[in-house]
Amino acid sequence: MNIGIIGLGLMGGSLGLALKKFSHKYHIIGYDHNKLHQKDALQLQLINKLASNFEEIKACDVIILTIPVDAIIKTTQTLTNVKEDCTIIDFGSSKEKIDNAIPETIRQNFVTAHPMTGTEKFGPSAAVEELYKNKVMVICNQEKSGKHQTQIALEIFKDIQAKVSFMDAKEHDKHAAFISHMPHAVSYAIANSVMKQEDPQSIIALAGGGFKSMSRIAKSSPSMWEDIFRQNKSNVLESIQTFNKEMQECQRLIEEDKWEELHQWMKNANRLHDIL
């Protein structure tokens, strides 16, 4: 089975590594507009070969889009003449706009998915073979995908040891804003709060594990996260507003010396880890 991966950064490179273990089953063909990414993907052996042109990717049995949401939407418009049984899988982090943008003539070819995994690193050198292992792979609006395409996608996800969950695209985008998108905004805010102090170096010298954990994802690609925030704008804003209300409540309790209430506020937060 020829699998064409468009985008050879963290997500695409890690997928290539995971699937290359099944050399008897998959032949991985990579495509990336970034020449350095092409070179690195070959040197790191993330793929079996580079596509000589985009038509080679379009001829694959499976096409997987591991590129930003805007690029996914643009690319879907160029795939209207793929072969009838082709399976196209996108890994976009917001799903509703992608789903709405897919041309109707190839909607059954598409499986819209979102792997709930990643790191703060990016590019081919960030690829890790087990990135998807035991991580949730959300498939959205599965009823719009063809039976053959769904079967192929599930087989691939099983091979990379992802745990599949089905969800409506609109529901996914709301949930993703709270558990992924808003935490990135908070991490960027924490980093900027420290960097705007008079002596950030002295503050950072005192930083322990808690600060490093909270600020780690502020190292994530600004280009990628600008795209995510824009595509899921309304849900991201709702999640940030909800977070701000909680911060204001914490501030009020401290200002008013409401220590018992603050204790209970924190105790309520502890309950989150009872369900994680």
Image: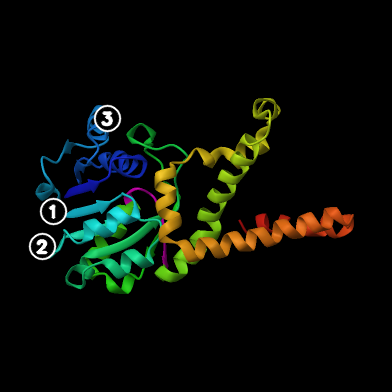
The reply to whether discs 1 and 2 touch (Cβ–Cβ < 8 Å) is yes
Indicate the position of residue 48 as horizontal and vertical percent values: 19, 36
Q: Nearer the viewer, residue 122 or 1?
A: 122
Q: Nearer the viewer, residue 60 or 223?
A: 223
Which comes sooner in the sequence, label 3 or label 2? 3
Three-letter code, disc 2 = Asn
> Circle 1 sits in a helix, a strand or a loop, which is it?
helix
First in sequence, mark 1 or 2: give its number.
1
Disc 1 residue crowd, few under 14, some 14–19, many 20+, Cα 10 Å: many
Residue 249 shown left or right of residue 166 in the figure: right
* Residue 28 falls in image quadrant: top left
- Magenta residues, start to end: 159-166
Task: Label 3, secondary structure: give it.
Answer: helix
Per the image, is 64 magenta? no
* Residue wearing tag 3: 40
Q: Which residue is mark 2?
A: 81
The colour scheme used here is rainbow
User: Who's the residue at 21% across and 40% down the image?
Assistant: 23
- The answer to whether residue 121 of the structure is visible from this angle is yes
Residue bearing mark 1: 58
